[in-house]
Amino acid sequence: MMVYAVGDDAVIIDCGLGFPNPWHHGIDLLIPDISALSELGLRLHAIVLTHGHEDHIGGLPFLLPQLKLPVYGTPTTLGLLEGKLEELHYKGDLRPLPELEPIAVGPLRIEAIPVTHSIMDAVSIAIETPRGYIVHTGDFKLDMAPLDGRTTALHRFASLGDAGVVLLASDSTNATRSGSSASERSVGPVLKQEIAGCRGKVVVTTFASNMFRIQQIIDAASANGRRVAFAGRSLERNSAIANRLGRLSIPSGIMVDIRQCKEIADHELLIIATGSQGEARAALARIAQNQFPGIRLGEGDLVLFSSSAIPGNERSIAGLFDHICRRGARIRHAGQAHLHVSGHGQGHELKTMMQLTRPRYFYPVHGEYRYLQEHRNLARQTGIPEERIIIAENGQSVVIDDRGIRHGKGFHAGAIFVDGQARDEVDTMVLRDRRTLAEEGLITASVIINANEGAVIGQPELTARGLLHQEVREEALEEARTKLLAHLEGLEREQLTDLEFLREDVRIWLRRWCKRALQKRPLVVAVVIGI
Ligand SMILES: [Zn+2]
């Protein structure tokens, strides 16, 4: 999510979501914390979307009802967003974003410029300012022969460069790779060839948003006389959107409902499945464990990974590979054959973008720090002087004025944790508790008090989970029980009748005991019941 302001008038570009790290227990999604947005003193006029990937639109179902701004996007992008908003029964003010045709957004003028990427209808955004154009590339590559013939509008980037680009904010994802990315088109023949070598069922997994890839998989299946079934809700949903927009060309009679697969001979069947990242609930994980109704994976079958591993998912994918191998099926992945290309431009493409736009200032965006740094090095190689390049991380503003480019004031820009199933926001306290539970376990104490007399009734009750080895547990808890009772009996009557005080006192006592006696810091829950 980026905010561009010309004076006080501003637009938001993209509003994505992130995925959790292993220590974000039970968290499914991270969305931008926009609490600082109102403190910036800007007049926000719209959200403008570059493309429909989750990390660019996924935050909107959560934040749009709060932001209440019109959203501009190209057909595929809006189609994907509409689907997400419908699930929440929220409509939103969605407006078409024409290409190569400036539109007024409040007092600002913006223009969408077609670029190629691993999703249909991706655009860069140009914003007019009194100092020249701001060009925000969004995710892009320079695919010179895109499957849909919708090429990157190189001529427009060049003419913006002629008119004067004050700032180029460019995609850094593949800045550490030299040369150029291969065309999406180059994957097709390899898919065809791999499928031809299989006598059994073929399962192909890929990113469900890449309709170019889906098209090529369908074409490869068709060339090999196979029918195609989709396994996975997001595939069905996304292909329905692309179909409705007339962007998929599906040979008639080739598609078959996944529930009818068992009626088709293995050598005449190809299944496109979600779950290339090893997601536990996705179709491929279930197929790999023979848990998907009507599909049995076995000897002679082939699973093609037309995908790459998103960093952090390697272990889940390795687990998925094991399941597939146990079924006796064969795996082919992008490390063995040219089954995948990236959607992000590499060194040569990034430098081409700089040369076309010839920006006064350069701002590498979208990527971890080392990618931003590498992108800066590329910019210097194209002749942009060091002092005209700026790197800013989340929560850091960048100012361009008569004095040049520099960091402006910082602001709070954290993430909100979302527990996806409940669609609830989870605060950092909950997250801390979950982490403690996972790493240190749980101990609880309940104490019953005669609230009138200030006397302990019976013995405190202690239970522990995930904390102590079974053999030592009873002994340790017995010791704690005796000592806690002695501690309680040493308290004043006044303290024993103040249940709120007592609860905190028991909690602290137990926490200290765990630390001293067990050298552990579990989550401590104290329950005090007054009768
Ligand atoms: Zn993208």
Image (cartoon, rainbow, N blue to C red):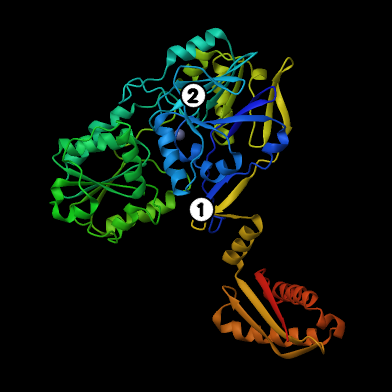
Q: Would residue 107 appear left or right of 529 to someone viewing this image?
A: left
Count the numbered circles shown: 2
Crowdedness near tag 1: few (<14), some (14–19) or many (≥20) residues, C-alpha within 10 Å: some
Residue 199 visible in this rendered orientation of the protein: no
Q: Which mark is residue 124?
A: 2
Residue 205 figure quarter: top left
Q: Would residue 325 appear left or right of 132 to someone viewing this image?
A: left
Residue 67 figure quarter: top right
Is the residue 526 above or below the residue 333 in the image?
below
Residue 507 visible in this rendered orientation of the protein: yes
Location of residue 10 in the rendering, given as x and y in whole percent from the top left corner: 63, 27
Residue sticking out furthest to the bottom: 458
Q: Quadrant of the C terminus?
A: bottom right
Ligand 1 shows up in which quadrant of the image? top left
Is the residue 499 above or below the residue 74 in the image?
below
Crowdedness near tag 2: few (<14), some (14–19) or many (≥20) residues, C-alpha within 10 Å: many
Q: Earlier in the sequence, mark 1 or mark 2?
A: 1
Identify the residue at image location x=14%, y=46%. Answer: 268
Location of residue 350 in the rendering, given as x and y in whole percent from the top left corner: 48, 22
Q: In terms of secondary structure, where does tag 2 sit?
A: strand
Residue sticking out furthest to the top: 162
- Distance from label 1 to label 2 (Cα)? 29 Å
The reply to whether the C-beta atoms of the residues labelled 1 and 2 are less than 8 Å apart is: no
Q: Which mark is residue 151?
A: none
Q: Which mark is residue 28?
A: 1
Location of residue 302 in the rendering, given as x and y in whole percent from the top left corner: 23, 48
Residue 411 figure quarter: top right
Q: Amino acid at mark 2?
A: Ser
Q: In terms of secondary structure, where does tag 1 sit?
A: loop
Identify the residue at image location x=30%, y=60%. Answer: 289
